[in-house]
Amino acid sequence: MSVVERAIKQIALPLSLDRQYSFENFISERADLITASLRALVRGDGEAQIGLWGTAASGKTHLLNASADYARKKGVVLQIYDARQLLQCDANEFEGFSHCDVLAIDNLDAIAGNPDWEACFYQVINRCRDGDYRFVFAMLRRPEDIETTLDDFRSRLQWGLMLQLPSNDDSEIRQILRKRAQLIGIELGEDVISYLMTHHARNLDTQMSILRRLDRASLSQQRKVTIPLVKQALLEPGV
């Protein structure tokens, strides 16, 4: 096995069994359509290729991991990679997808402008169309809005179903905060959620990062999450 082949094996994203990555707790105005489409792809009775696109923190990575969790439950082999990590390796050695039912790629637009990786995924999509496996990927922008060196790669990204993930509004972020907190055993009162939304950036990435810090602080101090605990925990780097 070559050094590059070993590197490829090492960069596969861990398919966590953490319950936070599920279709059931994906909250969006289009959740039913999006999750139904992904379930059907995983089972093999829906679209063979699905692309997800949307702004940062719109839920793309969550949905890919939820697809992996659903695949396990159905006995389907799904492999997931982050395209930003794949760029560190030789595109000619990328063969990990050969032995799966579903290939999932996060941040696929990261390879745009790299001719070797564009050519690689041009072939990946061709093989998907030939029925070798199903393909699901996530991007920040629509395929037609990215600049590529290989026009055929960009056009093939549009062959399947493209689903836009809307940004979460304040109400949805509140729901997600509450549900994620419950999953890790934290009860967030409305006063705490309002405090977090008022005093910190109202985007999902920031709020999830804060929730992880609050979880550590609550566990270490054996205290409920209250506004005083929030203030203390967020004043202490690394809590």
Image (cartoon, grey):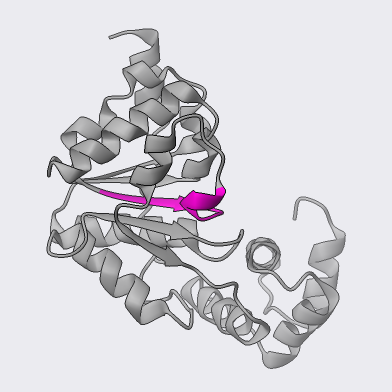
Residue 166 in sight: yes
| Residue appearing at x 60%, y 76% in the figure | 168
| Residue appearing at x 35%, y 81% in the figure | 32
In the image, 183 versus 106, the foreground residue is 106
Residue 20 in sight: no
| Left or right: residue 51 compared with residue 169 | left
Locate residue 169, reporting x and y percent.
64, 81
Locate residue 29, reporting x and y percent.
48, 83
Q: The magenta stretch spans which residues?
A: 135-145
| Residue appearing at x 50%, y 29% in the figure | 149
Quarter occupied by the N terminus = top left
Quarter occupied by the C terminus = bottom right
- Is residue 83 highlighted in magenta? no
In the image, 231 versus 67, the foreground residue is 67
| Left or right: residue 203 compared with residue 16 | right
- Is residue 143 highlighted in magenta? yes
| Left or right: residue 182 compared with residue 232 | left
| Quadrant of the rendered image containing residue 162 | bottom left
Locate residue 86, reporting x and y percent.
46, 29
| Residue appearing at x 30%, y 52% in the figure | 159
| Left or right: residue 25 compared with residue 109 | left
The number of callouts visible is 0
6 shown above or below 64: above
Judged from this view, the residue extending furthest toward the top is 2
Judged from this view, the residue extending furthest toward the front is 151
Judged from this view, the residue extending furthest toward the bottom is 190
Locate residue 224, reporting x and y percent.
67, 79
